[in-house]
Image (cartoon, coloured by chain):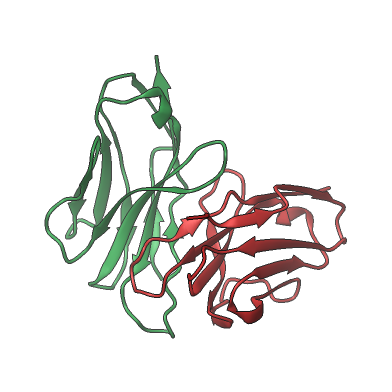
Chain colours: A red, B green
Amino acid sequence: EAGVAQSPRYKIIEKRQSVAFWCNPISGHATLYWYQQILGQGPKLLIQFQNNGVVDDSQLPKDRFSAERLKGVDSTLKIQPAKLEDSAVYLCASSSYRVGTEAFFGQGTRLTVV
Amino acid sequence: AQTVTQSQPEMSVQEAETVTLSCTYDTSESDYYLFWYKQPPSRQMILVIRQEAYKQQNATENRFSVNFQKAAKSFSLKISDSQLGDAAMYFCAYRSALETGGGADGLTFGKGTHLIIQP
């Protein structure tokens, strides 16, 4: 089966610009996650969707970050305006709706804010 | 909130030898899942092994095994017969098994251990 697809792989922007990342989960997976991985650290959960509803966005900086999951499939994560500290890898993951099941990850988008 | 601690930023092992990566966690929950993920330079997280907290038997997957000590909140990964392809970042992760909070079950990761394999 096809894995989690993310685009773009790399993005360089200037601070105060906006940027968007796209994720297509594994077919049939109801749960979708966005993680932020700053260099030298483990990934941190930003937001979790169950179908097209938000389950957990407690760690999402809502003043500049937003995310949506249209029709419960693809998802977009946006940053506006970007700050230098947003430089990180943004990982998308998906899983089927069953507690404790494995989450499958995409290859991530490396964002550099200059 | 749960926390995961990996105290070894970097480990080095000779090819074909055995290495153990350490992980401790803190939680007030009694039911949960623990995972070890491998992250090569391609950045994609790959599941190595998982352990259900209610199971006393330690999980094994070929050359990979864990030592799960629930009372001590310790979850170490042992890699036997290390191979060059094992070189990567390894992350320990925690996931709640409770269906509370509307199903929130995102992973909590440690900071990772960089594993180097010496040929």
Compared across the picture, whether A94 is left or right of A19 comes to left
* A18 up-or-down from B65: above or below: below
Farthest-out residue, top: B119
**Residue at the (16%, 50%) spot, across then down:** B58
Number of numbered discs on residues: 0
The reply to whether residue B73 is visible in this rendering is yes
Compared across the picture, whether B32 is left or right of A41 comes to left
* B44 up-or-down from A61: above or below: above
The reply to whether residue B66 is visible in this rendering is no
Work out which quarter of the rendered image holds the N terminus of chain B and state it: bottom left
**Residue at the (36%, 61%) spot, across then down:** B94
Compared across the picture, whether B45 is left or right of B93 comes to right
The x, y position of residue B40, in whole percent, is: 50, 37
Please state which of residues B26 and A36 is positioned toward the viewer in this rendering: A36
Farthest-out residue, front: A1
Tell me the quarter of the picture where residue A82 sits. bottom right
**Residue at the (64%, 70%) spot, across then down:** A74
